[in-house]
Amino acid sequence: MMKRIGVLGSGGGSNLAALYDHLRELRESGSASGAVPEIVLVASDQKGAGALERARKWGVEAAVLPDRGANARQLENLLREHRVDLIVLAGYLRMVPRSVIGAYHGRIINIHPALLPAFGGAGMYGKRVHSAVIEHGARVSGATVHFVDEEYDRGPIIAQWPVPVLRGDTAEALAARVLRVEHLLLPRAACAVAAGSIRLDENGRISHPPTVTHSPELAFNLQPESDETIVEGIDRVLTDV
């Protein structure tokens, strides 16, 4: 069980807030089957990041990393000092140092606003991703949570959820639709990894990869759905091994 989560972000921190709220709800409801992880550290390469402001409001340690990306030793010391078990990248735009990736093999995850491996890689973040999706004529986009390795957006995929690209969509409209799914997907994937139900084996592969069958009750529905329906589907993706 990975009980202590460190979050790295560069922006406003809406995915951080979704994770924080999900963990709080699990704790208050008593519905979790085991100990509920907690966020013990939020760090950003942007001193004015909203993610840091959120952390301070919650009483969570907030740390500023160097503007040009984290010095490997500084980041390692920060993570060690706070005894971080699992690193969650939530809108973090810098490459994580290789030494940190090595030290936290199988314990760093990221959320990306597209269905990887499409529309990923260096420089593909935020509006750029959604503009590229629309420009290429894709009919389906979505969100992906994956383990982090030495390449941008190339680590093993933990879970994905699709989002339709509608006729006449703007990058802003598609971004809002994808972000809604990100807020539901990331917390549940993070909890699955923290609990050890999804993990990497010694070969760097997901030991029990989540699968989706094609039975009607598990079929992806690209029509507007309730949050409850999306959550039910996400939970099945994460547990159907």
Image: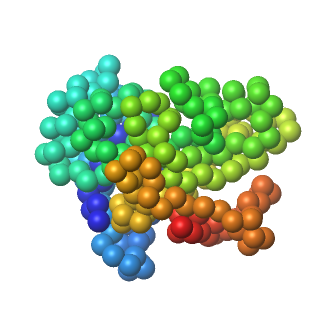
Decide if residue 109 is in sight here. Answer: no
Q: Would residue 223 be visible to someone looking at this image?
A: yes
User: What residue sits 35% from the left and 40% below the top?
Assistant: 8
Q: Quadrant of residue 81?
A: top left
Q: Where does the image place residue 112, in percent across and percent down from the top left?
A: 54, 40
The residue positioned farthest toward the front in the image shown: 203
Nearer to the camera, 58 or 214: 214
* In the rendered image, the vertical position of residue 121 relative to residue 229, given as above or below: above
Which residue appears at 23% of the width and 51% of the height? 84
x and y percent of residue 232 in the render?
Answer: 62, 70
Q: How is the image coloured?
A: rainbow
Q: Is residue 106 left or right of residue 126?
A: left
Q: Position of 222 compared to 232: left or right?
A: right
Q: Quadrant of residue 98?
A: top left
Residue at the right extreme?
Answer: 167
Q: Which quadrant holds the C terminus?
A: bottom right
Q: Residue at x 29, y 65 (%)?
A: 1
Residue 7 horizontal side relative to residue 179, left or right: left
Q: Nearer the viewer, residue 239 or 185?
A: 239
Nearer-the-camera pick, 51 or 94: 94
* Left or right of 194, for residue 156: right
How many numbered marks are there? 0
Report the residue at 69% width, 50% height from top.
Answer: 162
Question: x and y percent of residue 126 in the render?
Answer: 57, 32
Q: Residue 38: percent from the left, percent from the top?
A: 30, 60
